[in-house]
Amino acid sequence: MAVLPPNVTADSFASAIREYEAAVGAEWVFTSDADLAAYRDPYSIFRDTERESLASAAVAPQSVEQVQAVVRIANRYRTPLFPISTGRNFAYGGASANLSGSVIVDLKRMNRVLRVDADRNFALVEPGVSYFDLHRYIQERGLKVWIDCADVGWGGPMGNALDRGMGYTLPFFREHANAVCGVEVVLANGEVMRTGMGALPAADSWQEYKHGFGPDPSGLFFQGNFGIVTKMGFRLMPEPPHYRSGAIRLPKRLDLIPAIKLVNYLSDSGMLGEVFYESPLRALLGNSGFSAAANRRGGADPAEMDRYAADNNLDSWQVELQFYGPRATCLANWEYAKSRFESEVPGASFLEGESLDIPLTQEQLMNPRPWFRNGLWHREVSMGIPSLSAWSLVDARSAAAPDGQVVAHAGFFPIIPRSGEWVFRAQQVFGDAIADMGLPPFNAALSTPLVWAMFAYQMVFPLPDDNEIVHRALLRLVEVGAENGFGDYRSPPFHQDHVSDMYSFGDNALRRFHETIKDAVDPNGILAPGRGGVWPSVYRQFRHDWSRDA
Ligand SMILES: Cc1cc2nc3c(=O)[nH]c(=O)nc-3n(C[C@H](O)[C@H](O)[C@H](O)COP(=O)(O)OP(=O)(O)OC[C@H]3O[C@@H](n4cnc5c(N)ncnc54)[C@H](O)[C@@H]3O)c2cc1C
């Protein structure tokens, strides 16, 4: 099982390990198979095949100085590094690196919450801080700020944001890379750099003005490989006094078009949290005639879908809205939303949701909250409370797999423009692509947009359990998506080259720009080679051309 980094001899690697041990302490350098198992992606499509990415070792520094020492050793011995924060990037590769044989830099021991300011609404954290850690820190001190967390709470704000993860509260906060304000990074040459106001040594506004002066390179560290981030600031949402939800039901298929325009208006005006779209027509999926209509090649016929809806006394769509703020404001915004829908979408009807004073009582917190109740979603994460409940999705899928097979989890979430017309187009493009591949249909006409990003939609597509089929299907979906203008926003390491191939405007000008910078600031290519599709020249031959497999 033991692997070496490419182009490094066993003797040289052994010397590097001795130096890593001297730098961070022998007990924090891991080389045994048993220890390194923790850094394998348990849900990799390539698990237990020769294509699986394996670590050669892992080191766990405890301070910025130790990270600097690790980087300097890596340069001397040419051992590529792959930094992780809490290392729970499941569905996107877990803790595994793009380049097999990399040394994982596990930053879990750097887990201090350095600052939370509940008057100026920000936090500054180290990499190993999990969502649970940060939430607990805030609760223990009675601070009136919310975090925006991803499912699942054992991940952390820094690692998640560095993969451009997303959450569940107000738009500005839930697009996590957006809410970042100020980073500290150890560069490939071992120097420590701070971005924005952090570059001004006496400034206390590091977490309040992210741009500083001159070009702001902080974007290079998200889905990138230009440094090891050791501190990150986040804007936090002030705790609202009230939470309210409500849903709008729309009778006809084409009602989605005006509905999305209205929701865009409400959301971009700052009135809404995350929006959940659903189709009550899912209740008809046992009906084979309806299933054929929902999976029709070339897209569903609106009149046919409307007939099924009317005959069964069902609405075509449900749009659930969430409001945060003073109780009166929440109610007024909900009433305003209803009045707009009433006058602009004939036949719209309404479902009252929850009306909760914040903070929740201990009893409300302790009562297990079903995800879907009385036709509405109920999510702890919508109230800034981290949870493990989403993990049940993974457990359920694995339990259903044949013969204890490990089922791959690999995200494909293409970015879709925020309009009803584009949602219908995406349903048709991906529905037809799945049919062309001979895969089980996924009721494309009922798939609804996911409203995570601030100004764009994503969609999710269920795939079968066979890893090789999933691999080929994902490659093909990435291509079909790109041909139609839908780019994947995030990808596990093994598909990152393929996704980045699609972002090819100007004969791959963006990739050339990234790689020119990479070669200049990291000439030995030691930092996460291949991450985000950016390969340093010394490892460029490892870039995968997956187009042949698609
Ligand atoms: C059931 C389920 C639900 C999920 N729900 C969500 C969700 O709601 N939202 C969401 O966004 N994701 C979700 N995910 C995907 C993923 O599990 C989470 O995003 C998770 O939080 C990421 O892991 P992490 O926070 O431990 O980050 P890490 O694994 O620590 O980091 C992610 C990546 O960022 C880079 N990186 C990390 N730290 C550093 C550093 N200090 N310097 C440089 N680079 C670094 C590395 O390349 C690393 O692989 C879900 C997955 C599953 C299986």
Image: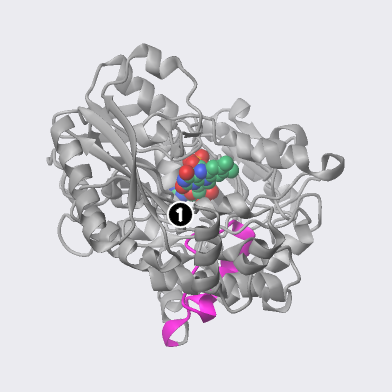
Residue closer to the observer: 527 or 275: 275
Q: Is residue 388 left or right of residue 133?
A: right
Spot occupied by residue 467 in the image (x, y as percentages of width and height)? 76, 56
Spot occupied by residue 82 in the image (x, y as percentages of width and height)? 55, 49
Amino acid type at image mark 1: Asp
Q: Is residue 337 left or right of residue 447?
A: left
Circle 1 packing at 10 Å, graded few (<14), some (14-19), many (20+), is: many
Q: Secondary structure at mark 1?
A: loop
Q: Which residues are magenta?
A: 481-506
Does the magenta run of residues contain 504?
A: yes
Residue pushed farthest front? 311
Residue closer to the observer: 448 or 394: 448
Residue pushed farthest right? 403
Picture mark count: 1
Residue at 60% across, 45% down: 94
Q: Which residue is mark 1?
A: 315
The colouring scheme, among rainbow, by chain, secondary structure or one colour, is one colour
Does residue 535 appear in the picture of this structure?
A: no
Residue at 51% across, 36% down: 152
Quadrant for the N terminus, please.
top right
The answer to whether residue 48 is above or below residue 539 is above
Residue at 64% across, 54% down: 285
The answer to whether residue 511 is above or below residue 156 is below
Dividing the picture into quarters, in which one does residue 32 lie? top right
Dividing the picture into quarters, in which one does residue 150 lie? top left
Does residue 370 appear in the picture of this structure?
A: yes
Residue closer to the observer: 254 or 102: 254
Residue at 36% across, 26% down: 135
Does the magenta run of residues contain 184?
A: no
Spot occupied by residue 281 in the image (x, y as percentages of width and height)? 54, 54
